[in-house]
Amino acid sequence: MKQTILGSGGAIGIPLAKELKNYTSEIRLVSRNPKKVNDTDELYPLDLNDLRKLPDAIKGSSIVYLTIGFEYNLKIWQERWPRLMRAVIDACQLHGAKLVFFDNVYMYARSAIPFMTEESAILPPSRKGAVRNEVAQMINTAVEQKKLTALIARAADFYGPDNNNSALEQMVARNLLAGKKVQTFGNPDKIHTYTYTPDAAKATALLGNSEDAWNQVWHLPTTKELLTGYQWIGLFARELNIEPKIRHVPTWMLRLLGLFIPVMKEFPEMMYQYEQDYTFDSTKFEKRFGWLATSPADGVKEMLRSRMPENSPM
């Protein structure tokens, strides 16, 4: 039973390939420059901005996992996400493949952010959220019309060993390891839960290989420890045995930096997620499958360990 990962080289695609080995020896990795994760992986080079070869990339697959992450740019999202999702759905329909979409929480209403469940209101407060809602609804419509079997696996903001682009990596871990000040934005006194990428990958593989999981939305297992931004920083600092110095970056400064660093201008519309409590609930998954997420302390330890030179003491 061949299972294919579209976007196989990213923070979720790499650990997902490791986990799928528990279910099948036929794994196809699709990305611009795919690299084997398992010895038996089949590699299919494809730039997912060029959709002409997408049906061939999916051909023969029983399950397709869409884990790609486009550049964090609104214009690119608006141009590429709907086109890609339409092409993926069409290709899955053509070849009779099931679809697993690895999603985020941007489509949830601002009022849902303090406690998000699979039943939370859908009312995206941002333009990026509108894009994510559009592509999720494309899947839902195809499922409702019985043209597609699919599931949506959602994660909170995430962190982990294979993730170099998360807020915790960019603004906390990387700075602490370089002896620099930690950067914060929003209100770091507010709760913010994060999903650990190895947990997300393991759970996504499990969902894709569970017959009763299809045609539903699932929140991937995420810690129930309600830590504030400052408490997350404290976990990293204690693991490194250092006293952190912290620099708060106000939203107006992000806008100013955006004049010189284009990606920075993408953050202000998402600040609502950091200015209130942000709690991501995965009770549905926990009840069905009976396991809990990795603790933040253990996740932070493994994340930092992966960034240390070999044989270097923590």
Image (spheres, rainbow, N blue to C red):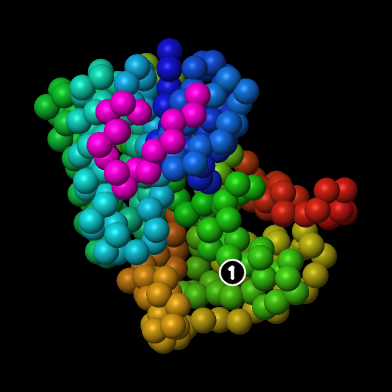
67, above or below 213, in the image: below
Image point (39%, 61%), residue name: 72
261, above or below 125, in the image: below
Q: Is residue 194 left or right of residue 142?
A: right
Q: Is residue 196 left or right of residue 48?
A: right
Residue 260 part of the magenta-drawn span: no
Q: Quadrant of residue 54?
A: top left
Image point (43%, 13%), residue name: 1
Q: Is residue 288 left or right of residue 79?
A: right
84, above or below 60, in the image: below
Residue lying at the far top of the rendered structure: 1
Coordinates of residue 40 in the picture (x, y in percent): 58, 20
Coordinates of residue 106 in the picture (x, y in percent): 33, 56
Image point (21%, 24%), residue name: 93
Give the extent of the magenta segment: 42-57
Q: Is residue 214 visible?
A: no
* Quadrant for the C terminus in the image: bottom right
- Observer-nearest of 230 and 151: 151
SS label for mark 1: helix
Coordinates of residue 277 in the picture (x, y in percent): 44, 63
Q: Is residue 291 left or right of residue 144?
A: right
Q: Quadrant of residue 18?
A: top right
Coordinates of residue 82 in the picture (x, y in percent): 22, 48
**Mark 1 burial class by Cα count in 10 Å: few <14, some 14-19, many 20+:** many
Q: On the image, numbered disc 1 is attached to which residue? A: 171
Say which amino acid is labelled 1.
Answer: Met
Residue lying at the far left of the rendered structure: 145
